[in-house]
Image (tube, grey):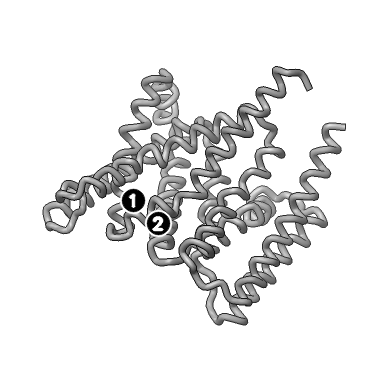
């Protein structure tokens, strides 16, 4: 590998760590806003993201791409669907964190690559490899273990995994880049978000501008916390092969898992340990299979 390619790879790895590390530490941010309802946090996250992304698009001179996407009926319909799914995913994650369910959220994002495999079979008629079939079976056993041993369906984990997997699948079909696409999505969320925040303020129950400067600052930071990791991810994707980038995705749920168990001290019973062990084993099977295929392609 030449020095230039090595520098590109190192820079890509740094951007990937920054992106997935930011998503992994997200619970710390939302925990700091635990006194604010999840729906209000989502509203502020939308408003400040629109403002920040608008500034970024102006700096990058990409408004032409935004206009092209907005005038394409097919792209706009797809982005309307992804907006609903993304908003639901964000709301569920914020609620899970502030309800003491970071462990369930981390399980959901561990499951996401396996859900992507299943969605590929259902939506794209892809064929499962033997390793993928084993991994999906292990994941199903993990979910079944929780249902049988604890008596509850891990709906938070399944909801996050399914919503994010479906979101990713639909975004692949939309002919729009990541930053432009996210701007349009939060722009579509803007009217109901502004209406909600105005209603909360008029009703006297909104938290912004009530004299707590720390809360105000945290709510404003929802913009960069939402947008910057995406920019870092896009920078990593330009520098790293997709197969290599995929291995970094486990950093986020791992950090969330460590926060849940060792910082927030959420219950981690034997049945949950068994479920996580099965999911981790499934991830290992898929990762080894992906690495083998990557080496075969490069050979």
Question: Which of 136/217 is in front?
Answer: 217
Can residue 74 be spotted in the picture? Answer: no
Q: Which residue is drawn at 82% across and 57% down?
A: 130
The percent coordinates of residue 268 (x first, y second) are 56, 72
Residue 240 horizontal side relative to residue 30, left or right? right
| Quarter of image, res 12 | top right
Q: Is mark 1 on a helix, strand or loop?
A: helix
The quarter of the rendered structure image containing the C terminus is top right
Residue at image coords 69%, 66%? 277
Mark drawn on residue 94: 2
Residue at 63% x, 51% y is 123
Residue 262: x %, y % from top left: 53, 63
| Percent of width and height locating residue 30 | 38, 54
Q: Distance between the residues labelled 2 and 1?
A: 8 Å
Residue 15, given in percent of the width and then of the height, sits at 57, 33
Please report the residue visible at 61 percent of the width from the left and 57 percent of the height from the top.
110
Q: Is residue 66 left or right of residue 110?
A: left
Q: Across the whole image, how many numbered discs are drawn on residues?
A: 2
Q: Which mark is residue 42?
A: 1
Q: In the figure, residue 147 lies in which quadrant?
A: bottom right
Proximity of marks 2 and 1: CB atoms separated by less than 8 Å = yes
Q: How crowded is mark 2: few (under 14 residues within 10 Å), some or many (20 or more)?
A: many
Q: Which of marks 2 and 1 is nearer the N terminus?
A: 1
């Amino acid at each position: 590998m030449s020095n230039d390619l090595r520098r590109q790879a190192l820079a890509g790895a740094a951007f990937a760590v920054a992106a997935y590390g930011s998503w992994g530490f997200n619970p710390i941010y939302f925990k700091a806003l635990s006194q604010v309802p999840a729906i209000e946090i989502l509203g502020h996250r939308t408003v400040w993201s629109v403002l920040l992304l608008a500034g970024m698009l102006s700096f990058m001179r990409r408004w032409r791409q935004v206009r092209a996407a907005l005038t394409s009926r097919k792209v706009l319909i797809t982005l309307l669907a992804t907006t609903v799914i993304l908003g639901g995913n964000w709301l569920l994650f914020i609620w899970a964190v502030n309800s003491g369910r970071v462990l369930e959220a981390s399980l959901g994002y561990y499951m996401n690559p396996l859900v992507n495999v299943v969605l590929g079979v259902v939506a794209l008629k892809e064929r499962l490899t033997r390793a993928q079939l084993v991994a999906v079976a292990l994941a199903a056993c993990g979910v079944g273990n929780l249902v049988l041993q604890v008596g509850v369906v891990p709906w938070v984990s399944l909801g996050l995994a399914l919503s994010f997997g479906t979101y990713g699948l639909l975004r692949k079909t939309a002919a729009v880049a990541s930053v432009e696409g996210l701007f349009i999505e939060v722009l579509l969320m803007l009217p109901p978000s502004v209406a909600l925040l105005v209603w909360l303020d008029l009703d006297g129950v909104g938290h912004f501008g009530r004299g707590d400067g720390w809360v105000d600052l945290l709510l404003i930071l929802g913009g960069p916390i939402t947008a910057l990791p995406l920019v870092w991810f896009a920078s990593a994707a330009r520098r790293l092969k997709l197969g290599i980038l995929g291995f970094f995705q486990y950093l986020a749920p791992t950090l969330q898992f460590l926060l849940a168990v060792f910082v927030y001290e959420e219950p981690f019973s034997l049945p949950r340990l068994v479920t996580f062990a099965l999911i981790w084993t499934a991830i290992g099977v898929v990762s080894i299979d992906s690495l083998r295929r990557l080496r075969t392609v490069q050979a």
